[in-house]
Amino acid sequence: MIFIINSFLFDFMTFGTTLIVNFVTKSISFMSNKKSPLYSVLNNKCPRCHEGSFFITNNPYDLKRFGNLNDRCPVCNEDFRREPGYYFGATYVSYGLTVSFGIGLFLLLCVVFSVEVVPYIIILSTLLILLMPLFYRFSRIIWIHMFVKFKELKNN
Ligand SMILES: [Zn+2]
């Protein structure tokens, strides 16, 4: 009887480990797969070809230039400027990112680690200020990804 329970537990743990390993390897391959939009968003790439740079600099903490985007993709010539006020809609994405981040941090600090609300607000405000360039860039690049579909370059 004990042997059966032991072998069942062992199978269950092996199954769990396999699931976790699969999940991690799939996530890594999804992020490093050049055709995936997540790869393009995380690596500052053009939404059309996933090759040319979207922002002029790859460094979000180059504070003089972090928000400057190329007028056109240097590789496929996709128009990044599109129309006046195009990136106004990115504020909705920015709002979604900020709120998700705030809820995630709340769950981690207040629910898991029982941190009080006031220290949580101080930590959240500090992190939001420090991460502002990242959120700014992510919201713009996610916004353009919603409208421009990936098309593989023919010479690849
Ligand atoms: Zn391109």
Image (cartoon, rainbow, N blue to C red):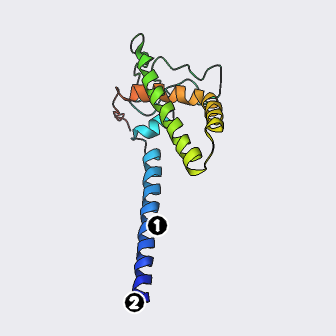
> Which of the two residues, 34 or 140, is positioned nearer the viewer here?
140
Which residue is denoted by mark 1 in the rendering? 17
Residue type pointed to by label 2:
Met
Of badges 1 and 2, the one in the foreground is: 2
User: Which quarter of the image is occupied by the N terminus?
Assistant: bottom left
Q: CA distance from mark 1 to mark 2?
A: 24 Å
Is residue 148 rendered to the left or right of residue 110? left
Label 1's element?
helix
Which numbered dot is residue 1? 2
> Which of the two residues, 74 or 69, is positioned nearer the viewer here?
69
Residue 26 x/y as whole percent: 42, 54
Which quadrant of the view contains residue 79? top left
> Which of the two residues, 90 or 44, is positioned nearer the viewer here?
90
User: Which quarter of the image is occupied by the C terminus?
Assistant: top left
Whether 61 is drawn above or below 2: the answer is: above
What residue appears at the point 39 percent right and 12 percent down from the top-left corner?
Answer: 83
Whether 130 is drawn above or below 9: the answer is: above
Q: Residues within 10 Å of mark 2 (few under 14, many from 20)?
A: few
Mark 1 or 2, nearer chain start: 2
Residue 71 x/y as whole percent: 47, 16
Is residue 110 rendered to the left or right of residue 88? right
> Which of the two residues, 32 or 118, is positioned nearer the viewer here?
118
